[in-house]
Amino acid sequence: MSIHPDPSPTDLDNPRTPLPRFEPGPLGKLARLAFRYRGRAVLLWLAAFVVALGLSTAFAGAFNADYSAPGSDSHAAQDLLSTRFPAAGNDTVTLVAHSTEPVTDPVVRARIDQVLDQAGAVPHVAGFADPYQNPGAISPDETTTVTILRVDTADPLDMPHESAAALIRIAKDSSRDGLTVAVSGVSIVNEEAPPIGSEVVGLLAAAVILLLMFGSIVAAGLPILVALAGLAVSSMLTGLIAAMLPVPDWSTSLATMIGIGVGIDYALLMVTRFREWRAEGLDPEEATVATLDTAGRSVVLAGGTVVISMLGLFGMGLSFMRGAALVTIAAIAIVLLSAITLFPALLGYFGAHIDRLRLPFPRRRARKHGSPIEAGTGWVRWSHLVRRHRFVAAATGLGILLAVAAPFLGVHFGFPDSGNSAEDSSTRNAYDLLADGFGPGVNGPLLITTTTTLPDGSGDSSTGATALADRLTTAMTSTPGVAAVSPVQRSPAGDTAIMIVTPTTGPQDPRTEDLVRTLRADVIPTAIAGSDAAVHVGGAAAVSIDSTANISQRIPVLIAAVVLLSMLLLLVAFRSIAVAVKAAVMNLLSVAAAYGVVALVLQGGWAGQLIGIDHPTPLAPFIPVLMFAVLFGLSMDYEVFLVARMRETWLATGSNTQAIVKGLAGTARVITAAAAIMIAVFAAFIPSTDIALKVIGIGMAAAILIDATVIRMLLVPAVMHLLGDRNWWLPAWLDRALPEVHIEGHPQHYQPTTSGNAEQPTTAPQLASV
């Protein structure tokens, strides 16, 4: 970037002395090109969409995810099941029938047989075992039967909508006159969780907020166009990413909600700055260049912090987490690219008419950049109030955050299942019927896999394997907490055997996790002593234990890496140790508060019932990790927006008080609107029947609300008033070592100079030398 020296006082005093030409930075130059060649810029984006669509159509992969921890005991069990028992990997649907009369009664049996015949005739149902001929398929009290319907699609996502809907309809139509029928399975869950149009709801809410803020359809429409253009391209790349590595199906919703939020927020900031430059008297092209050369820098920095946070997920060692992170990073990067290329091109068409198509709201003119802020404005009064009571404000903000975060101390980790579905769903009914008829443990069986050669030295492989299986069965059956152990099933090659252990407690009961630990630590090692057998314990409870342990070991590294990299980025951008450290601490507090809100709603009390969680639900171990990466990056966005304007005022005045007051007053409205948009986007996912999306939605919305109010509007200014000029301190040696990036840009060079007296910055105190 070419920086020309500021004009001297002598030049300023002489209106005839021409001011030296200022060369904008890379973003300003890019904005000028996009503005002047706006038609080509728009065509390039259309071409990018067509190319991405073609690649996605030709090479897109299918969604898949393995939630077990790599290298764990449960992961080994799952691997053996999929490789040695390939038929077990096919999709299935469980059909449960409950009668007020014994199911062995001829009339009841005839009705159940009729239901099974109808289900067996549904396309893609390959067959089933007659429950009356299958041992263990009838409950001890003879009121419930369970039948496993074999499906000819290996992936539940491949089950046609019509087939899943037909099974649900058969179950519903058959439930009458004392007979209750329900079906469950992944394909049934997918069918009962149709798209809720969260993206559309979020966009509509964002449009309303933008209209209220700008009062102009043109100004409000630009941020939405920028976000939609970026998402249109990035969404086409999701399938390509899924072809390269595992990507969970919910990652598209995550990437969409974040892409919409950050895309609109970034364009919102630049529209606001563009209108300010227009109010200064700049023509549309120069205002576009000035906008990208000032606010555009903050946008790039903000986007960079979000990407850095998401990159931290690659260090968790979880394949599905890498896939979700890459899909989200692609959405953020492309939306950011849209903000710095397509946005200035659109200003070439609409910049001169930014305030056209106004709604009948009271007109609020954009304040000139250099004009004084009226002392009576609400945000100025608020900032002065915080300054006068900075100790109370800081203590109050910290107390609120700690109180909100407190419920997380009692959170229970685990994987939600059909028992957490809506009460009126077929999957929930099937879950409850199975628990009532066969015991709660039937919904969360443990998978025991055994590989052995000559376990007892007899020289007969089959005899040795049988003896080992018998010892294991005897040992596990006599273990407290075990309701039943299934007969041994051998692989076609005969080198692997599996057994199903049914606990006496449900899959989310802490006693089931205790049973897993007991089997692994005591029962199984004793039973296989003296053999070369390898025994692994899998199942939902085992996966939860292993995933939680894996994440617990890695999350400190994730937090440290993301925090340090973000602090380094802020240190370079704002050249202040206090700003970097304060931002990291504040963002960690914001994340902790979000965790507390999530834990509170998962308790299933009054808070949970507000969003459709009616009883205690465990927290999937990967969700806090994902939330940390996303929230830490998004919180940095608001920090950058706020502090960039504060630093700009600090450099112009040298007054910390003015920097805080003007920075807050100049960005509070933008931050509030941006936060409201982000909250609306995330809140639109709360009605989802997917527990993970519901929890992420409420956690993100709560975090943004807390961050934009308690932290940015209360705690940050209070702490900065307490620190005083130390906010901008940097050791002299570090000041010399760090590159100069001028994150605030050079707004003084874009001030009109018709009078010959351009507004020049007052040299700030050289705190680096203190």
Image (spheres, rainbow, N blue to C red):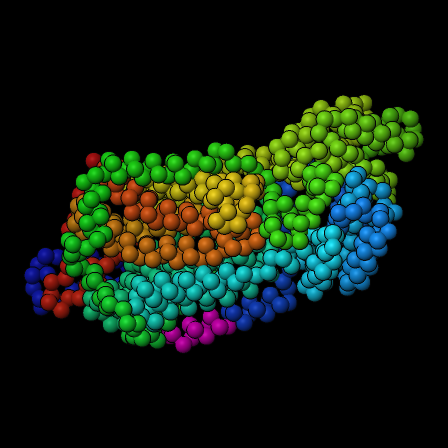
Q: Is residue 26 visible?
A: no
Q: Is residue 193 above or below residue 277?
A: above
Hey, which quadrant is residue 517 in on the image? top right
Left or right of residue 705: residue 9:
left
**Tag count:** 0
Residue 36: say if magenta.
Answer: yes
Q: Is residue 182 visible?
A: yes
Q: Which residues are magenta?
A: 34-47
What residue appears at the point 45 percent right and 61 percent down from the top-left corner? 202
Left or right of residue 372: residue 396:
right
Where is the N terminus found, in terms of image quarters?
A: bottom left
What residue appears at the point 38 percent right and 74 percent down from the top-left corner? 38
Instruction: Depth check: give the residue in front, 325 or 341.
Output: 325
Instruction: Depth check: give the residue in front, 277 or 100.
Output: 100
Instruction: Depth check: give the residue in front, 713 or 453.
Output: 713
Residue 461 picture location, percent across and down: 90, 33
Residue 368 picture location, percent across and down: 20, 63
